[in-house]
Image (cartoon, rainbow, N blue to C red):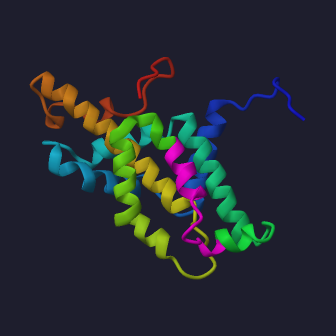
Amino acid sequence: MHNKRIRVHSDEVTKATRDALERRHVTIDDIAEIVYTMQSPYNEGLTIEHCVQSVERVLDKREVQHAVLVGIELDELAEKRLLSAPLQAIIESDEGLFGVDETLALGAVFTYGSIAVTTFGHLDKQKIGIIEKLDTKAGESVNTFLDDLVGSIAACAASRLAHRMRDLEEEGETFADIPPNELGPSPKANTEI
């Protein structure tokens, strides 16, 4: 049944997204480290704090939140063996020809443009930082969607920084000239990516 009157408040979705990542042992700092690794060679004065703030901002986007919530839910259902066959086996084994995990993560990446898309592709192949740990985790954990979602968030945050760097260059500045909190979550009225 479809009921347009039921609305989930954005604060609830944001909290659920962050809780889901925490439940899966992924921190904002873990994602920020990937962003720093990707962007520090190209951005003078960039600090890990700038990267943390960029990740925070990405996690405020509904497209990203929805992808994270759906993907983590599917991973957790697969861990509990609650999916139907053959989907259970496909997700549980992270079958190579199963591309829905990348497709879901890529949908969120499109919000941040071509730089985010190419960065996501690089991260999907190189498995930097926690992405590698999630991708190779043995045992009961299923991270079929999560590793790609972390790559998606990192790619989006890196793209934000690349675009911000261009703005700074035009103003004759670098990241050393701006405090990290200028990159972080903004008041709800501001819709800047």
Q: Which residues are magenta?
A: 92-107
- In the image, residue 80 sits, relative to residue 65, either above or below, namely below
Q: Is residue 94 left or right of residue 133?
A: right
Residue drawn at (41%, 60%) of the image: 124
- In the image, residue 88 sits, relative to residue 116, either above or below, namely below
Magenta: main secondary structure equals helix
Whether residue 104 is in magenta: the answer is yes
Residue drawn at (43%, 64%) of the image: 131
**Depth check: 67 or 91 in front?**
91
- In the image, residue 27 sits, relative to residue 39, either above or below, namely below
Whether residue 185 is in magenta: the answer is no
- At which x and y percent is residue 130? 41, 65
- Find residue 5 and report its image quarter: top right
Furthest residue in direction right, as rendered: 1
- At which x and y percent is residue 188? 51, 22
Residue drawn at (18%, 36%) of the image: 175
**Depth check: 64 or 100 in front?**
100
- At which x and y percent is residue 17? 59, 46
* Any part of residue 128 in sight: no
Q: Is residue 150 left or right of residue 165?
A: right
Furthest residue in direction front, as rendered: 97
Q: Is residue 77 left or right of residue 2?
A: left
Furthest residue in direction left, as rendered: 172
Furthest residue in direction bottom, as rendered: 139
- At which x and y percent is residue 21? 55, 55
Quadrant assignment for the C terminus: top left
Residue drawn at (62%, 33%) of the image: 11
Total residue callouts: 0
- Find residue 71 and report its image quarter: bottom right
Q: Is residue 171 left or right of residue 26?
A: left
* Any part of residue 91 in sight: yes
Quadrant assignment for the N terminus: top right
